[in-house]
Image (cartoon, rainbow, N blue to C red):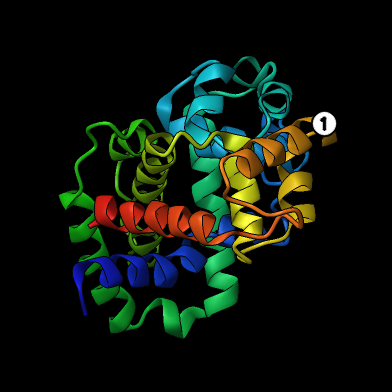
Amino acid sequence: MSDLRLARALWRVMEPYHAVVYFAPDVKSAFEDLGLPGFWRGYFASRAAPMGPVPAEVVIATFYNFHPDMVRWAMSETWSRADPAAVTAARVRLADRTLRAWLGAEAIASPDVAKAASLARRAAEAASPLGRPLFAGYTALEWPVEPHLVLWHAATLLREHRGDGHVSALIGEQVDGCEANILTAASGASTSELQRGSRQWPDDEWDAAVDRLRGRGWVDDDTALTLAGASVKRRIEDRTDDLAT
């Protein structure tokens, strides 16, 4: 397997393990005691917390494809309500109880988990934080002790390392946050309804971004990728793999 294929395969394997914190049954209430009710306040705060009490503008820049107004709303008064370290600790507790519930005690204690944790940690610690602000914040966190959480933390580090690289690839192609969502939907990796709704892009801004991509010859009248658009999308993903490698 080539290095680029390996980088993409690693992401596909590790992403679900990291993502348990977004789909846990109690994710909406996990941060309520800290004054952050609902899904999106906890989502933005918990992902951004390792960078410290940064303003919403830094979160907008690093999360990239969410509408700025959505981020400003979710981050409003966040750090006056909750200390970043407390938010991070709550997220680790959420990962711990979710993994224990879903995997079970036998799997948690298995040699395979310990081996995977060791290998994933080696990969995460070998990655450079230079030019990767979100990943860099995570490298300053202490490693958990238990193997299933070491594996989760490593998966999270590798995920944010790749994500920072993906933003760089998008910027290199002069694709903005809204346009990135449209290309994702046009490629079949998601739908326009899901991307627009979850990232909260208003219809007028979404339609304007479609017009820009159509003007570049990247999408057709049905907002499907043209040959040129497919080439650009492939180049972005390949560059993301290259930077992850």
Residue drawn at (49%, 55%) of the image: 228
Residue drawn at (30%, 56%) of the image: 145
Kind of residue at disc 1: Asp
Q: Would residue 158 be found to the left or right of residue 222 on screen?
A: left
- Depth check: 118 or 16 in front? 16
Dot 1 crowding, Cα within 10 Å, few <14, some 14–19, many 20+: few
Image height of 79 relative to 11, above or below: above
Instruction: Say which quarter of the image contains residue 242.
Output: bottom left
Residue drawn at (40%, 46%) of the image: 166
- Quickly name the residue at label 1: 204
Image height of 83 relative to 231, above or below: above
Q: Position of residue 96 (x, y in %)?
A: 51, 60
Q: In what quadrant of the picture does the N terminus appear?
A: bottom left
Q: Position of residue 122 (x, y in %)?
A: 18, 59
SS type, badge 1: helix
Image height of 208 relative to 126, above or below: above
